[in-house]
Image (cartoon, rainbow, N blue to C red):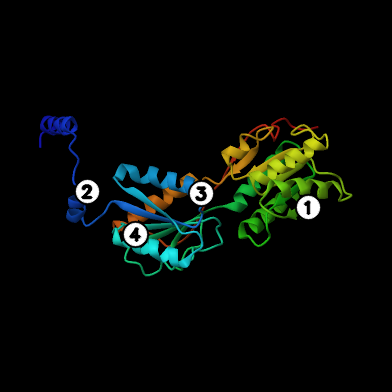
């Protein structure tokens, strides 16, 4: 077809509001041009940025994302997987709320490719996750670079694999004796942790790395109540780069971004490749984190 003819047809189609029949297109190509996204992260803290990355990767290929939230209900999970298969999705991406937890539904042996992102994958699957150790190294190194010498780590429950990976990487930089306090993923715990640190009887920390942004905000509030200035007296770094928390902290919070959008983009491109029959090596892929600098961690070298 000549370029002039093609342009004329497209112009007329736009004028009359013509849309191709997606069902007919799918029958011809044996594809539905949809990808199923299955998650137990009903709050959406981790799933929404992953989904944004998936959509960004697939939009140019004419592929849409079909989201199903299953909470932690195996029966609901099976219902949604069956619904996805009934809709003849071209593939499924499973995601969740922690990297060391699996969804309560068996996705092995399905007739469509399955890729895992920010959740535990099945054996011989392709799984994407954030490199927690890398993120902790970035945070502790930043604190050292600006002259902080007495570092502490306030983090979440010690039954999370991510918590152990971050604590180990933190101590590799801060020293094996650097205090690590385990608790909950909450502002309340961050507040309590400062009280514990101040009662340890050792030199008080001048740099605190927190396991998430909520803990960090609790830490900052507790320091302020003690008349400790952030970042002049103590620098604070969080983890997650949860914009609604980090940007609204006072001062705004320096934090580690897990690059969940890029993680989703990579998962989307991979499930597309698998659906098209291209070879993809199975295994775990850890994506690097990045440091997002805001005012809670001064860039000025301390004396």
Distance of label 3 from label 1 (alpha carbons): 32 Å
Considering depth in this image, is 297 or 83 the residue closer to the camera?
A: 83
Which is nearer the N-term, disc 4 or disc 1?
4
User: Could you tell me residue 161's position as x and y percent?
Assistant: 62, 60
Q: Quadrant of the C terminus?
A: top right
Residue 209: give its label.
Answer: none
| Dots 4, 2 in contact, CB < 8 A | no
Q: Which dot, 4 or 1, sits closer to the camera?
A: 4
| Residue drawn at 72 percent across, 47 percent down | 188
Q: In which quarter of the image is residue 168?
A: bottom right
Which of the two discs, 4 and 3, labels the residue nearer the N terminus? 3
Disc 2 designates what residue?
Answer: 22
Is 145 placed above or below 102 here? above
Q: As rendered, which of 124 and 264 lies closer to the eye?
A: 264
Compared across the picture, whether 204 is left or right of 54 comes to right
Element type at marker 4?
helix
For the N terminus, the quadrant is top left
In the image, taking residue 49 as reference, residue 204 lies left or right, namely right
Crowd class of label 3 (few under 14; some 14 to 19; many from 20; radius 10 Å): some
Residue at 55% x, 46% y: name it. 258
Few, some or many C-alpha atoms within 10 Å of disc 4 (few <14, some 14-19, many ≥20)? Answer: many
Label 3 element class: loop
Rendered residue at 55%/62% (across/down) = 101
Distance between the Cα atoms at labels 4 and 3? 20 Å
| Location of mark 3 (residue) | 44
């Amino acid at each position: 077809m000549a370029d002039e003819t093609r342009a004329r047809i497209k112009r007329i189609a736009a004028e009359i509001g013509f849309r191709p029949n997606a069902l007919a297109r799918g029958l011809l190509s044996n594809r539905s041009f949809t990808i199923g996204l299955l998650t137990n992260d009903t709050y959406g803290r981790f799933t929404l940025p992953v989904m944004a990355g998936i959509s960004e990767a697939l939009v140019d290929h004419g592929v849409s994302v079909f989201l199903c939230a299953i909470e932690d209900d195996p029966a609901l999970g099976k219902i949604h997987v069956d619904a996805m298969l009934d809709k003849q999705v071209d593939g499924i991406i499973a995601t969740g709320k922690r990297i060391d937890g699996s969804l309560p539904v068996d996705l092995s042996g399905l007739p469509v490719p399955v890729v895992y992102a920010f959740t535990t994958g099945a054996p011989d699957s392709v799984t994407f996750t954030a490199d927690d150790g890398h993120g902790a190294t970035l945070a502790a190194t930043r604190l050292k670079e600006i002259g902080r010498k007495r570092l502490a780590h306030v983090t979440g429950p010690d039954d999370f694999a991510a918590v152990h990976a971050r604590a180990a990487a933190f101590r590799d930089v801060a020293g094996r004796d650097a205090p690590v306090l385990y608790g909950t993923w909450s502002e309340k715990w961050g507040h309590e942790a400062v009280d514990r640190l101040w009662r340890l009887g050792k030199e008080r920390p001048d740099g605190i790395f927190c396991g998430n942004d909520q803990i960090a905000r609790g830490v900052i509030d507790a320091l302020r109540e003690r008349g400790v200035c952030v970042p002049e007296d103590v620098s604070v770094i969080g983890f997650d780069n949860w914009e609604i928390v980090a940007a609204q902290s006072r001062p705004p919070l320096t934090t580690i971004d897990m690059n969940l959008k890029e993680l989703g983009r990579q998962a989307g491109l991979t499930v597309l490749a698998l659906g098209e029959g291209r070879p993809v090596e199975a295994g775990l892929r850890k994506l690097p984190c990045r440091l997002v600098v805001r005012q809670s961690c001064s860039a000025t070298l301390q004396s």
